Image (spheres, grey):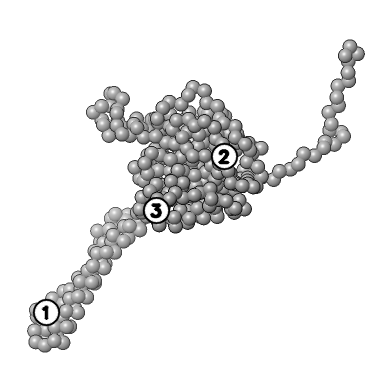
Amino acid sequence: MMRTRTSAAARSPFRRPAPLVLPLAWGAVAVVWRFWCPPAGEPGLPMRIATSVVFLSVGVGLVLGLRRGPVRELARVRAVAAATQRVLLRPPPARLDGLALAAGQLSATRGATVGGDLYEAVATPYGVRIVIGDVRGHGLAALGAVVAVLGSFREAAHDEPELGGVLRRLERALERHLRDRARDEHPARAETEPRHPAAEEFVTLLLLEIGFDGRLSVFNCGHPGPYRLGGRVERLPVGDPLPPLGVLPLPADLVPHAAAALLSGETLVLHTDGAEEARDHRGRFFALDAFLAGRAGETPAALVRGVHAALLHHTGGRLADDVALLVVRNDRVRVPAQPAEPGLRRSRPAPSAHG
């Protein structure tokens, strides 16, 4: 006969009162002491002090016993949130097809570990493809759109040979999510196209492909361009912006902007607008480019930690918007071209007699 484990739900009715057993027993002793023990009725300051200490101890024990349940529940909720973040915004591998990567997010919602920003990097037969985006709004309400866009990207990045096909798939996934969400919240209008604030949500994003030779192809849908760290810090040109996803339909012809190559040893810092729009108590914006100056030699993980620490210091820990960072460094070794061996050289065709 198979043995089955008792579920936590079945044990919970007996386990939850356990922290209260000792203070309740103590309280019963205090009541017996107060009303049925003859010495307790004797006048005098020492006896009143002893009685007060007993009842105060009982009260403290009850408060601590009642507090243990919410503390444990909060710990479980935080563990679930951490697991959700690892699945939804999973950290990229430290190395991906010769590139060093690191990423991280700061949520503007107190106590939240996920928000309205998204990022992902995958190695595909067409190169390393990267997306970073920002859902309108922040916090837990934007998670649905984040799930829709990231889920579509993780599939389309491998399936679509052209980067424009990936972007088209992201647009369709977001449209489906917004349409389904609006209909769920307004079931009486399911037969018609719903008009709801969810239908006005949009996502700004940057879709990037790093070729095997380091060449960059970029689609910019209303998102801030990344910084490139080499000999100096410069904003990488990303071409004319397309509308954010969910605002207007994408054009029929999608041609990515051919940006300059990411050379060996250079670093690309992709970010959401919360990084540069963060203000201090005087209303001054955070100067991300100034912070990155002179840090080209740092690892991607050190750059992410440094920017997060500088942002929290600049804002006093009070972020107005979510902040996501994804840092990529090209660690591919550049091998100079070598002259071909004599036996491998192609011979030139002999000139014709009529030439």
Which is more N-terminal, label 1 or label 2? Answer: 1
> Which of 8/62 is in front?
62
What residue is disc 2 on?
236
| Left or right side of 41 for 10 | right
Image point (15%, 81%), residue name: 51
Residue 6 picture quarter: bottom left
Image point (88%, 18%), residue name: 351
Residue 321 percent location from the top left of the image: 39, 46
Image point (87%, 34%), residue name: 342
Find numbered disc 2 in the image and state the secondary structure of the residue it sits on. loop
> Which of 5/144 is in front?
144
**Residue 158 in view of the camera:** no
Residue 314 percent location from the top left of the image: 44, 55
Mark 2 vs mark 3, foreground winner is: 3
What residue is disc 3 on?
282
C-alpha separation, residue under disc 2 versus residue under disc 1: 79 Å
What amino acid type should be assigned to the residue bearing mark 1? Arg
C-alpha separation, residue under disc 2 versus residue under disc 3: 29 Å
Q: Quadrant of the C terminus?
A: top right
Which is more N-terminal, label 3 or label 2? Answer: 2
Seen in the picture, residue 234 relative to 167 is either above or below; the reply is: below
| Left or right side of 104 for 19 | left
Neighbor class of circle 3 (other Cα within 10 Å; few <14, some 14-19, many 20+) is: few
